[in-house]
Amino acid sequence: MQQWWRHILILFVLAGQWAAAVSAQVPKTVAAGQAFTVRVDGLPGNAQDWVTVVPAGSSDSGWGEYYYSGGKRSADFTFRGLAAGAYELRVYFDYPAGGMTVRSRFPFRVGAAAASRPAPAAAAPARPAAGTRGPARLQAGKYTCSMFTGSGLMILGDLAITADGRYQGVQLDGGGERGKYTYDPASRVILFSGPLGGSFGKILYTMYKTDTRGENFIEIGFMTQYTHTMSCSID
């Protein structure tokens, strides 16, 4: 019996060490609209340990732009620019087994936009960093859109993309808004001519991304009461 309790105590101590060991290098202040990178160390090494940035005071079950660690114990994560305000970087372990328990949180502020400076007259146009350019065009087909919630994966509906630059927005019955889209391979940004359908509030961004397996998907950030991210993968 004593040996059994000793093992339980060791497990609790180890769990506490993981929680205490997580650290992050987060800028104290970030200029509004400016992308920024954070480094997180001391993760337990699960494939679906993950980090997210949310407005300060948000529910622990809410999330914004997020990234999985892919099993790394230390990793860098780059987030898109945010509006001015107070935010937190939050760290979660081993989704979905770890639930929506925040293991570590790191507050920071987003301030006023950095003052722009005119480029020298002879300066060459800025070019995207090597390796960031996307495929020449979006893959046509039906994309299934989903997002993680506190109770698991939620299917939001289908997004149809055609090769001639048209789309039909996200809707469970396939009857979403119709319109045209443009896609810029250099930035991977997708612009839709109209709403996407559904109750997605304000669309913050839409990008064509590539996962760790080399498969392309559409990521859409949107804001209702909180910021959310949906991923749309082709069937």
Image (cartoon, rainbow, N blue to C red):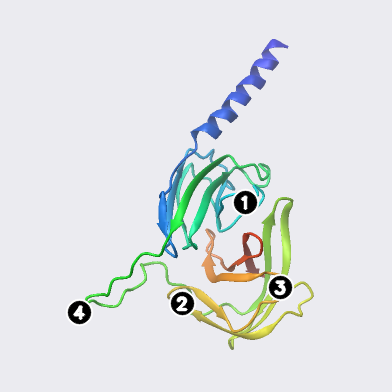
Q: Which residue is mark 3?
A: 158
Of marks 2 and 4, which one's residue comes earlier in the chain? 4
Of marks 4 and 3, which one's residue comes earlier in the chain? 4
Q: Amino acid at mark 2?
A: Pro
Q: Amino acid at mark 3?
A: Asp
**The one of 159 and 52 positioned closer to us in this rendering:** 52
Instruction: Tell me where residue 195 appears, x and y as whole percent.
Output: 65, 79
Quadrant for the N terminus in the image? top right
Q: Is residue 77 left or right of residue 234?
A: left
Q: Which residue is mark 4?
A: 122
- What whole-number distance in Å separates the C-alpha atoms at marks 4 and 1? 46 Å
Instruction: Tell me where residue 31 appears, x and y as whole percent.
Output: 40, 60
Of marks 3 and 2, which one's residue comes earlier in the chain? 3
Residue depicted at x 22% and y 76%: 120
Q: Using the rendered image of the protein, determine whether residue 66 is visible from the camera's viewpoint.
A: yes
Q: Which residue is mark 2?
A: 185
Q: Using the rendered image of the protein, determine whether residue 69 is visible from the camera's viewpoint.
A: no
Quadrant for the C terminus in the image? bottom right
Residue depicted at x 40% and y 66%: 131
